[in-house]
Amino acid sequence: MTEESKKQRQFEAKIDLMRERIKDSDDFKVLDEVFDRRVLMDLYALASKGVISSLGGAVSTGKEANIFRAKGEDEKDLAVKIYRINTSNFKAMQNYLLGDPRFGSIKGTKRAIIAAWTRKEFRNLRRAEEVGVKVPHPIVMRENILVMEMVGDVETPAPQLKDVTLEPKEAELAFEKITEYISLLYNKANLVHADLSEFNILYHEGEPVIIDMGQSVTLEHPMARSFLERDISNLARYFKKKYAVGSEEAIKEKIRAGKAG
């Protein structure tokens, strides 16, 4: 056996091993679309380093990314987000990347853009966490794979805010907390979420948790102010319509107070 064929057989064995680790997904179409050979090898590398011990079924599926249940060290519950190379909206992604001084020079293949987007989400989550915003704790990223803590647990992941019905006082506290997070992102982390709504907020143990920060931009981005206004409008609209709580002005006042502080 030549050295090349030996390496090929070792490569195939690693692929097979990683497929065995993906043991609970019954959607084989999604399996084939998401877990191409390169993703399997990257997952194998993460497993070899002890980051992932097993990978289970999907928590959520979308056009741009799928999130899977996983176990890590000491059976810790993890969420593994895998961005799709073939179906992601690259033009929209580039618009968010090009205006960001951290990633503005990214050009080239779809895979390179997706890798930059994944790296951007990892850095944004870490930056948000550092200033006190409650987000899924980012653990590691590799190419188009982002590993985070699971909000909730693998059996019952935390629901989106849109799927929760809050008591009046709970709604008031949730609005105030999210408003505080918007201010912290803007004034302390130099970030705007840029897609904040009831769809991108989880609710866990009485607390809102901000998610999906791949598109979040720094204040240097030419559309940052416009994105901030949209976030404010979305949040105020949702809470006003469902709970008769909050207003755009209340959010803007919190941001102004955060800047002054």
Image (tube, rainbow, N blue to C red):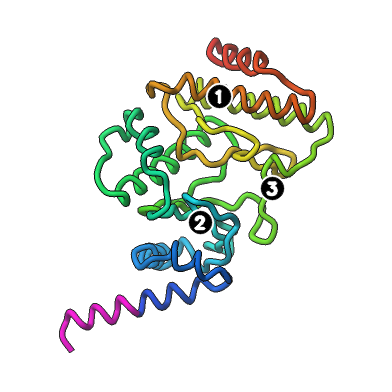
**Location of the N terminus (image quadrant):** bottom left
Residue 245 x %, y %: 77, 23
Residue at 57% x, 22% y: name it: 183
Label 2, label 1: how far apart the Cα atoms are: 28 Å
**Which residue in the protein does label 3 denote?**
159
**Which residue in the protein does label 2 denote?**
80
Q: Is residue 126 left or right of residue 13?
A: right
Residue at 17% x, 79% y: name it: 4
Looking at the image, tell me whether mark 2 or mark 3 is earlier in sequence order.
Answer: 2
Q: Main secondary structure of the magenta part?
A: helix
Which element type, helix, strand or loop, lies under badge 1? helix
| Foreground tag (2 vs 1) | 1
Q: Is residue 173 above or below residue 211?
A: above
Which element type, helix, strand or loop, lies under badge 3? loop
Amino acid beneath label 2: Val
Residue at 38% x, 66% y: name it: 36
Looking at the image, tell me whether mark 1 or mark 3 is earlier in sequence order.
Answer: 3
Residue at 59% x, 53% y: name it: 150
Residue span colored magenta: 1-12
Label 2, label 3: how far apart the Cα atoms are: 17 Å
**Which residue in the protein does label 1 denote?**
230
